[in-house]
Image: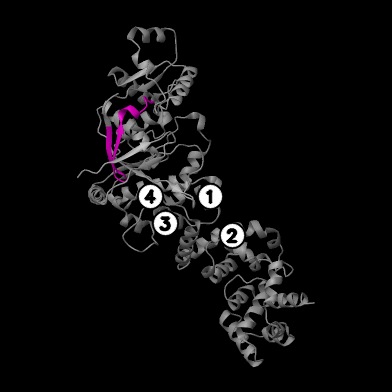
Amino acid sequence: MLFTARLWISRSNRIAVHSISTSSKLYRSHTLHFAARRWHHTPVRVRFAPSPTGQLHLGGLRTALFNYLLAKKTGGQFILRIEDTDQTRYVEGAVEKLVSALSWAGITYDEGPGCGGPHAPYYQSERTDLYRKFANDLIENGHAYRCFCTPERLQKVRESRHKTGRTVAYDKHCSYLSDEEIEEQLSQGKTFTVRLKVPSEGSTEFKDLVYGQIHFNNKTIEDTILLKSDGYPTYHLANVVDDHLMGITHVLRGEEWIASTPKHLLLYKALGWSSPHFAHLPLLLNADRTKLSKRTGDVHVEQYIAKGYLPEAVINFAALLSWHMKSEEEIYTIDQLIQAFDLADLNNSGAVVDIAKLDWFNKHHLLRRAETAEGLKSLVDMLVPSVHSQFGSILKDRDQAYRGDMAYLTRVVETIKDRIRNIQDIPRLCSYFFVDPDYTTAAAKTFKKKLKAPAIQLVFSPETQQQLSTVEPFDGATIKQFLHETAEKQNVNPNHVMMAMRYAVTGTQVGAGVADTMAVLGRQTCIDRITTAKAHQV
């Protein structure tokens, strides 16, 4: 039985898939699984083709990642192409930021800006002569036509057709012009666009590697503009021409481009070319299942970088948005993702972006990094700028400067790594490693109220402070043993004493074991803070 998912594209381009019988679902699963599996034995050529209009969106990173994984899995090539033909939306420096974000994420391209390749240039604005040539070819073979309609007429047509409930905004007016009428318009110097001539009968359909068989009635397809009046191509023409000339075998892109795919297929056919295979990726969603938007949180890769997320965590997180592997394992390196990637495991359900899940991934990858000397150093390198930014004025003090040194920060990271999710948690939640606690805050006062009187009295006693000054070596294990023995001698619960000491030296409940924290802070700092905390008991 042939499975066909008919997608009805509304004016808002939202997609609703009709209900599917169980048998049809099974057919789709087996068919797409087989189709996807075949390409793992043949090197593919794929591309990521963003517009330089700003920062790299999380959805864009996922698209680039899936293309990259497929290329590496099959021993193929991954190409970066910049679609910059819409000069009104061009943002200065956007390409450099894009390349930097991909590099940070570990996604390298085989051809593209900066590294060249056999199909250069990789900026579409430098390929306009090609697009004009193919636009003229389409006019010559009757698959496209010049449109001389003014913006005012087009607006009136849109309004009129909208009132009558028609989904196609243009009325094909200029497709009916005679050769004489066209020549007259040209002789008068009238500007024109070039439109695709969509067949008025029949249908266009294709098998999407994610959504299955998709069918479009040609009557619902617009005679889309291929070449604008300024001579620059639209996405539709440039995309098809470049994908063909660059030998792209598979197009992995966002779900929002499904509505454009029949136009592209008609262009391939009109130009006498074979089309690539298509796999459209579902939308990324907010928790309320609305489309992911910057109004509801972080959506750009640069925001995740600024907040201290590790690239391997962001990649791991992005990879599992709409891709579900058969393994129950969730933590993957980029090499493991390449090994496991399979188009058949992509699904067509919108993926909710859960930042708590990203935090979970980040914690796991942070601990992985900290297992090696090189990885630990990289974490400290990430910590240095934020520490100096937040505590720079304090670190200028000669007696406090050591707290900004690599050796001290390394001990901080080693001590607190099991208790944090993000390296930026250290200056934000554990400021006591760099500045003396503020015992007057509401949080500190609330913490103090939880302490048991015998425990706080023992910590503040002169005898305890005097004995603390003689503990050798001043490391976590020895300090812990000292505090436990002191508590037991005075018949006080050791856990209560540890809590009281945490208050005295940090002023907060957040942190690693108190004995290990004291070892990092140093003997004199701990004694000084106990004295200060005691003064706040009055």
Tag 4 residue = 349
Tag 2 residue = 384
Tag 1 residue = 298
Please name which of the two marks, 3 or 2, marks the residue nearer to the observer.
3
**Tag 4: residue type?**
Ser
Query: Is residue 370 among the parts visible in the rendering?
Result: yes
**Tag 1: residue type?**
Asp
Q: Earlier in the sequence, mark 1 or mark 3?
A: 1
Mark 1 neighbour class, 10 Å CA radius: few under 14, some 14 to 19, many 20 or more: some
In space, the residues marked 3 and 2 are separated at their CA atoms by 25 Å
In space, the residues marked 2 and 4 are separated at their CA atoms by 41 Å
**Residue at position x 50%, y 33% from top?**
90
Tag 3 residue = 316
**Residue at position x 70%, y 76% from top?**
449
Q: Is residue 326 above or below residue 110?
A: below
Q: Is residue 228 above or below residue 432?
A: above
Mark 2 neighbour class, 10 Å CA radius: few under 14, some 14 to 19, many 20 or more: some
In space, the residues marked 1 and 3 are separated at their CA atoms by 17 Å
Q: Earlier in the sequence, mark 2 or mark 4?
A: 4
Q: Earlier in the sequence, mark 1 or mark 2?
A: 1
In space, the residues marked 1 and 4 are separated at their CA atoms by 21 Å
In the rendering, at what x and y percent does residue 433 appear?
64, 68
